[in-house]
Image (tube, rainbow, N blue to C red):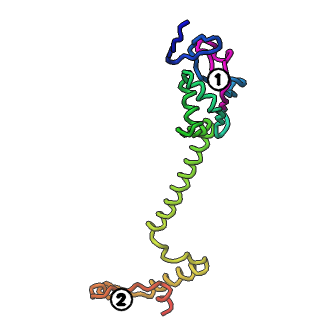
Amino acid sequence: MNNRVVTVTGAACIAGGVFVSVKIRLARYGAKKVPFYRVVVVDERSRRNGRYLELVGRYDSLKDPSVIDLDLEKVDRWLGKGAQPTEAAAKLIAIARGEKEAPKKEAKPSKRAIAKAEAEAAEAEAKKAAAEEEKAAPAEEPAPAEEPATEDEAAVSEDASSEADEEASPDEAPAEEEAPAEDEAPVEEPAVEEAAE
């Protein structure tokens, strides 16, 4: 009997001294669209959810934050025997050891929520534009000269202006035209004051 030391990469010796390729991988369990995973050590040739050699942990991706429960002593023992972790299992092991940060989940909004948010944004934009137009509109328009007179005051001022026109003679008219030729511009007086004279 020869005592030979055999080193095979990616293989582990299981009961009976048989070398098989061993993987640490995820086995999917749970209902449709509600999965959770077991981290298991399996023969490479076995099915995804088939017989496993040892259960080394659990992973629930639906919880927030994700639950990663690994027995690192068992994982290290199997890695020491030559088991090869799959890509997903290697990431979970790194996260459990603290070498990597767990990925952050971002909630993906539904189409209805996106449409609602766009409608609210458009409505807010329209309100903002309307407010800006209101602010700009009074600044562009000239201020009102006088408030409109009541009906009684309007009738009195019309009567007074017609009387003032009748009283004015053609001799006074040329004198009024010469007045603007002076350096100072004449100030027009309201018709009510002319009637008072």
User: Image height check: is 90 above or below 121?
Assistant: above
Q: Amino acid at mark 2?
A: Glu
User: Image height check: is 78 above or below 162?
Assistant: above
Number of the label disc, if any, that sits on residue 172: 2
Tell me if label 2 and label 1 are in contact, CB under 8 Å. Answer: no
Q: Nearer the viewer, residue 23 or 124?
A: 23
Q: Does the stretch in magenta take in 53?
A: yes
Q: Nearer the viewer, residue 180 or 39?
A: 39
Q: Nearer the viewer, residue 161 or 184?
A: 184
Q: Amino acid at mark 1?
A: Val
- The picture quadrant where one finds residue 178 is bottom left
Query: In the visual, does 100 lie left or right of 29?
Result: left
* Residue span colored magenta: 41-59
- Crowd around label 2: few <14 · some 14–19 · many ≥20 (10 Å): few
Q: Residue furthest top?
A: 1
Number of the label disc, if any, that sits on residue 40: 1
* Residue at figure coordinates x 56%, y 40% from the top left: 98
